[in-house]
Image (spheres, grey):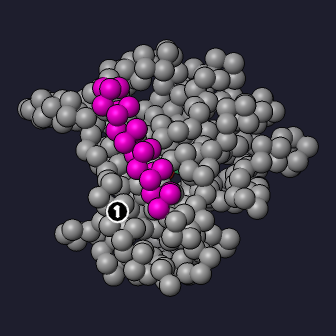
Amino acid sequence: MSQFWSPSVRNLSPYVPGEQPQIDNLIKLNTNEHPMGPSPRVLEAIRAATTDRLRLYPDPEATQLKNAIAKRYGLTPEQVFVGNGSDDVLNLAFFTFFRQARPLLLSDLTYGFYPVYAELHGIRTHVVPVDDEFRIQPDDYLGQAHPKAGGIIIANPNAPTGIALDLSEIERIVAGNPDVVVLVDEAYVDFGGQSAVALLDRYPNLLVSHTLSKSRSLAGLRVGYALGSAELIQGLEIVKNSTNSYPLDQLAQVGATAAIEDDAYFEAACQAVIQTREWLTDQLQALGFEVLPSSANFVFARHPEHDGAALAGWLRERAILVRHFKRDRIDQFLRITVGTSAQCQSLINALKACVRP
Ligand SMILES: *Cc1c(COP(=O)(O)O)cnc(C)c1O
């Protein structure tokens, strides 16, 4: 802490991402990256754009990318906002929509960045607990259940549980809160969730965010986007253009465009992860783990006889990284990213040596 920092910075507690250690032969199942590389067309497009033209500023509107995203979802480019990873998009959305007199509603068990943005922007929050099965209950987000909301943020599928609400449940929340923005963070939706994009033409208060970091295998490129009514997107553009005109560099724009346009590769890559997830779930259950039903590219699992932190430590000693959260209610769980079949097999082998009596 320094006297030179603005007062509001002195008490911030920043988000801590999963570690990215530079160790060879590490089996890295801790930050939900895709185990396959991006579409070869992405690499080709980035290579082709690696020229002298990098001396020029990129297109501040990312027109090509917005057009590609709009086309893929049957929307207009005015309904698309792009940012430097969906964390950037979420940050701008919190600033644009949630600095209200009334509190933002969010789950007690969800993406750890949401309370950080709220604190950064001085947004009051009202925390809604998930139920005993770690599920979000839509009724808890309807008018009578809480102080009137200034906004709602929901991750669907949720992190770190992987549990998804179905479309009708999301719709009840969106329809039940017509006066405020409902932001649905669909970082993991491509692994088996139902997207709220289907609701966009009926609800001007709905904003959906996506990332290319997970299902498009591009965590290193930093591209995310939001889809919503032109009215919401315009608000985001004003705030973006008040902070950084060029959040997406030239290479990110062409790479992301190629990724969005290669649906065949994307579908196959998602299916591979889903298949491995089902195998991994069966294997963990056979070892006595309780595994929450996942619609994401990770599973959230605990063992009745083995401490979560101890298991994570055991795996770490064998060069396998998983994520463990030292938080109330979930400190016995491991969040395990679905890797390649071989990586998941190694994980199971390591666990067998530990949990078998
Ligand atoms: C990974 C993740 C993000 C962030 O994605 P980036 O685009 O890499 O910034 C956002 N929300 C949730 C729930 C995530 O798990």
Q: Please tell me which residue is depicted at 48% across the width and 41% down the height of the picture.
A: 191
In depth, the one of 192 and 53 nearer the eye is: 192
Whether residue 13 is visible here, answered yes or no, is: no
Element assignment for label 1: helix
**Magenta residues, start to end:** 262-283
Q: What residue type is labelled 1?
A: Gln
Q: Please tell me which residue is depicted at 12% across the width and 34% down the height of the picture.
A: 47
Residue 37 falls left or right of residue 323: left
Residue 118 falls left or right of residue 319: right
- Quadrant of the rendered image containing residue 64: top left
- Above or below — where is 290 with respect to 62? below
- The residue that disc 1 covers is 345
Image x and y of residue 269, in percent: 34, 38
Residue 282 falls left or right of residue 69: right
Q: Main secondary structure of the magenta part?
A: helix
In depth, the one of 209 and 275 nearer the eye is: 275
Residue 111 falls left or right of residue 343: right
Find out whether residue 216 is within the magenta segment. Answer: no
* Farthest-out residue, right: 144
* Farthest-out residue, left: 52
Whether residue 285 is visible here, answered yes or no, is: yes
Q: Please tell me which residue is depicted at 40% across the width and 67% down the height of the picture.
A: 348
- Quadrant of the rendered image containing residue 18: bottom left
Q: Please tell me which residue is depicted at 83% across the width and 44% down the height of the picture.
A: 139
Image x and y of residue 311, in percent: 47, 79
How many numbered circles does the render carry? 1
* Label 1: how many Cα within 10 Å (few below 14, some 14–19, many 20+): some
